[in-house]
């Protein structure tokens, strides 16, 4: 017959193994999500920079038009 303490320890070890597997899956998912967020952030930074340059160009043109008038 298996010792009750040994059986209890085996159950706890199995629970820890399942928890580790669950946490590994969650960690993998979070890493993928973080990579997606970083890619999206880079795209937004680039779009913001393009918009900033366009606005600056418009301001320069407006100032030039204002001086010509």
Image: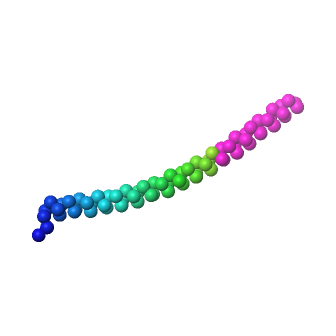
Is 60 contained in the magenta span?
A: yes
Looking at the image, which residue is at 25% across and 60% down? 13
Span highlighted in magenta in the image: 46-69
Please name whichever residue, 36 or 12, is drawn nearer the observer in this view of the structure: 12
Q: Residue furthest left?
A: 1
Vertical comparison of 20 with 63: above or below: below
How many labels sit on residues?
A: 0
Vertical comparison of 4 with 51: above or below: below
Vertical comparison of 54 with 1: above or below: above
Looking at the image, which residue is at 54% across and 54% down? 36
Q: Quadrant of residue 10?
A: bottom left
Position of 37 with respect to 10 (left or right) is right
Please name whichever residue, 3 or 36, is drawn nearer the observer in this view of the structure: 3
Residue 56 point in image, percent of width and height = 74, 37
Q: Quadrant of residue 65?
A: top right
Position of 15 with respect to 31 (left or right) is left
Q: Quadrant of the C terminus?
A: top right
The colour scheme of the drawn protein is rainbow
Position of 26 with respect to 4 (left or right) is right
Q: Residue furthest right?
A: 68
Is 1 contained in the magenta span?
A: no
Q: Residue furthest bottom?
A: 1
């Amino acid at each position: 017959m298996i010792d009750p303490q040994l059986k209890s320890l085996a159950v706890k070890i199995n629970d820890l193994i399942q928890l580790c597997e669950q946490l590994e899956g969650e960690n993998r998912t979070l890493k993928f999500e973080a990579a997606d967020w970083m890619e999206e952030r880079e795209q937004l930074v680039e779009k913001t920079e393009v918009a900033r340059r366009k606005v600056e160009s418009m301001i320069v043109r407006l100032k030039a038009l204002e001086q010509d008038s």
